[in-house]
Amino acid sequence: MATLRRGSRGAEVKELQLILQRLGYNPGTADGIFGLKTMQAVIQFQKDNRLTPDGVVGPITWQALQSKDQRYQIYTIQSGDTFYKIALKFNLSLSSLIAANPRVDPNQLRTGQQIYIPSPQPKPVLIRSVGGWIPYWLQTQAFRSVQNHPDMFHNLSPFWYEVTISGEIIKYPGAEDNSILSFARTHGIRMIPLITNAFSSERISTVLNDPIIRQNHINNIVRLLNQFNYDGIDINYENLFVRDKEIFVVFLQELKMALAIGKQLIVTVHAKPDPFGDWSGAEAHDYIGIGQAADAVRIMGYDFHWFGGEPGPIAPADWVDRVLTYAVSTIPKSKIVLGVPTYGYDWPLELGQQGRGITYSYAISTAQRYNVPIIEDAQQGPHFTYTANEVVHEVWFIDATSFATLLDLVNKYDINGIVIWYLGAEDPKIYDVIQAKFQASV
């Protein structure tokens, strides 16, 4: 830290004044100006701590201030240190470490340099579970969301695995990333990776209906969980044949019996407001049977309008409400987890063209780029239209306000919690919403 004296100005002076205030001294307004009052407060602090009372804040006075102030401690950069490694070492979020050192460039650390280490803040007590899906194609960006908000997450499910037609398990790019695994374990976040059938009805039908292949697949899942000491597995087998509805439940029952005690079986299912839904994949997911076999059931409460269809809201509140009404009538509430979206779609209104997935930040920047108003709608989701290359586009997405509406429904039905699809796409304000909606009352 810089040596400060009367006449000094800037962020470090303001931080000094805030520390003095927290310690019960009166440096005047924390305005970043080292005036007479601040100097008098420094001298009094130095006298109280048997330091030379010269009113100058050099290394010795800084160290004494930091040792007395429970909010921070001083750390000396060592060879090979990065902010990420330091945050991991002190069980901090990366964002809190960066915020505590506004004048330090994380990419220009020097051995011997001193930085502030903020005291870990107590983990917020939430009345609902919060999970996050990490897509392998956006893994770095998604993981950054976790690093910035580790206290928000109870579990993470990265898209790491895919089942083959022979019941083997193949890995996606970035699977089994040790930085994610170690960060999660350091912060007490349960790792429950996801395995998918890549939306193939035929492939998973072959696995389910051949007893030998089915057992081989179960053995491979058990082996995987043991190898990496995962806390469970998320079975994300979509677009099943309706004729495989019952055998899928049999598979889940057999898998649950094979899992070691304490390993969670989570099953992700299509959303539907009744036993049939509006397509065969939804009908093939038997909520009653799956709810009995699984430890938790994640309902994908999104894609009411999808990229291959007409433009419209992704997770309209009235539809999600109907989905949860049916869910709580078939699955124990304590097992139900609502998959909530964070993304959007941009549909070109031109014959034969499909929409494409977009992030919250892309939606905002697109509206700004084309200077078009965003229609705010807490129940349906924000949306707007713009014209590019003579083609009209319609955009629907999720922001913190529409996200909050979905959390209100989670509270209304008193279900277990949420899982976010997907991390890396979100409006950063959703974390304030989660804390506000799920904060335990004191």
Image (cartoon, rainbow, N blue to C red):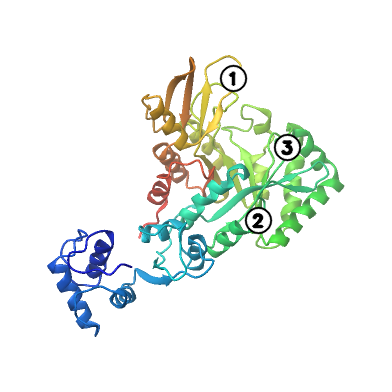
Q: Which of label 2 and label 3 is nearer to you?
A: 2
Q: Residue at x 49, y 65 (%)?
A: 86
> Do the residues bearing badges 2 and 1 touch, measured as CB atoms within 8 Å?
no
Q: CA distance from mark 2 to mark 3?
A: 23 Å
Instruction: Give the numbered dot on residue 232.
Output: 2
Q: Residue 224: x and y, percent? A: 73, 56
Splitting the image into 4 quarters, where does residue 7 fall? bottom left
Q: Nearer the viewer, residue 100 or 360?
A: 100
307 relative position to 246: left or right = left
Graded by Cα atoms within 10 Å as few (under 14), some (14 to 19) or many (20 or more), the crowding at tag 3 reads: some
Q: Residue 361: x and y, percent? A: 45, 37
Q: Looking at the picture, which amino acid does disc 1 mark?
A: Gln
Q: Looking at the picture, which amino acid does disc 3 mark?
A: Lys
Graded by Cα atoms within 10 Å as few (under 14), some (14 to 19) or many (20 or more), the crowding at tag 1 reads: few
Q: Name the residue carrying label 3.
A: 245
| Mark 2 or mark 1, earlier in chain | 2
Q: Look at the numbered disc 1 and give the secondary structure of its residue.
A: loop
Splitting the image into 4 quarters, where does residue 304 fall? top right
Q: Name the residue carrying label 1.
A: 353
Q: Nearer the viewer, residue 46 or 111?
A: 111
Question: On the rendered image, what quadrant is the N terminus found in?
Answer: bottom left
Q: Residue at x 49, y 24 (%)?
A: 312
Res 381 visible: no
Q: Is 418 located above or below residue 13 in the figure?
A: above
Res 217 visible: yes
| Mark 2 or mark 3, earlier in chain | 2
Q: CA distance from mark 2 to mark 1?
A: 39 Å
Q: Which of label 1 and label 3 is nearer to you?
A: 1
